[in-house]
Image: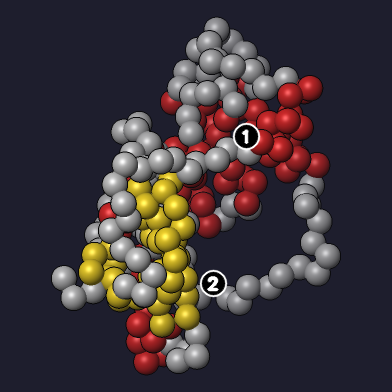
Amino acid sequence: MNGPHDLGGLMGFGPVAPEKDEPYFHAEWEKRALGLTLSSGALGAWNIDESRHARENIPPANYLGASYYEIWTRALEVLLQRHGFVTADEINAGHKQTDGAAPKRVLKADMVAGVLAKGGPCDRPVATPPRFAAGDRVRTINFNPTTHTRLPRYARSKAGVVEAVQGSFVFPDDNAHGKGENPQWVYLVVFEATELWGEDGDPTSTVSIDAWESYIIPADG
């Protein structure tokens, strides 16, 4: 979707200013926000793509006025309500009022280290061979879905070159909406900055993105 999260190429937000020796967390509550998000994800009711879509669905004024972990907690509230674990009244009250949905699993303290070490691999086998190969010229599709996608606005309907076949992975556009994992081949596609930004682009720069197979077509097609 064309939401507030998709800021690539937009103006007026100022330069990126990395903080020297930036800590992992700027406040104690941020640690809890991360812990709550990870432990709630372990309940087994949603996947990482649905959680990303919940964040990008936050109203623009609220999203752009929130910090990183504020965005996480607001999206988590949406997910917990959507899947029946809490109600809006319980969130406002700060305590349980009714019995919510039963989780598929619970992440206990002694399990955390192992779960984090294992991660959440999203590579999956695909029965068909890759449609494209390194060196192929391709063009991204031009679409404006109201649903989740990993193809940013600035890279749509743009010509680039496949640099590598990355493997086959869960298709987030479907997985975010309960349509199944439907894995596809993913390609590293390189774009000239002038292709993306026109004459204002730096002719010495390139931008690379991971593009699922359904995002691209032959450049001369």
Q: Nearer the viewer, mark 2 or mark 1?
A: 1
Q: Secondary structure at mark 2?
A: loop
Judge the density around disc 1: few (<14), some (14-19), many (≥20) Cα neighbours within 10 Å.
some
Q: Is residue 67 left or right of residue 8?
A: right
User: What residue is pinned by disc 2?
Assistant: 13
The foreground one among 80 and 151 is: 151
Q: Residue at x 31, y 33 (%)?
A: 179
Amino acid beneath label 2: Phe
User: What residue is pinned by disc 1?
Assistant: 37
Residue at the top extreme? Answer: 99
If you read the primary sequence from the N terminus, does the residue marked by circle 2 or circle 1 appear first? 2
Instruction: Give the percent coordinates (x, y) of residue 219.
Output: 23, 74
Residue at the left extreme? Answer: 221
- Answer above or below: position of 135 versus 216: below
- Marks 2 and 1 sit apart, C-alpha to C-alpha, by 28 Å
Amino acid beneath label 1: Thr
Q: Secondary structure at mark 1?
A: helix
Q: Residue at x 49, y 24 (%)?
A: 45
Q: Residue at x 62, y 21 (%)?
A: 93
Instruction: Give the percent coordinates (x, y) of residue 176.
Output: 39, 39
Judge the density around disc 2: few (<14), some (14-19), many (≥20) Cα neighbours within 10 Å.
few
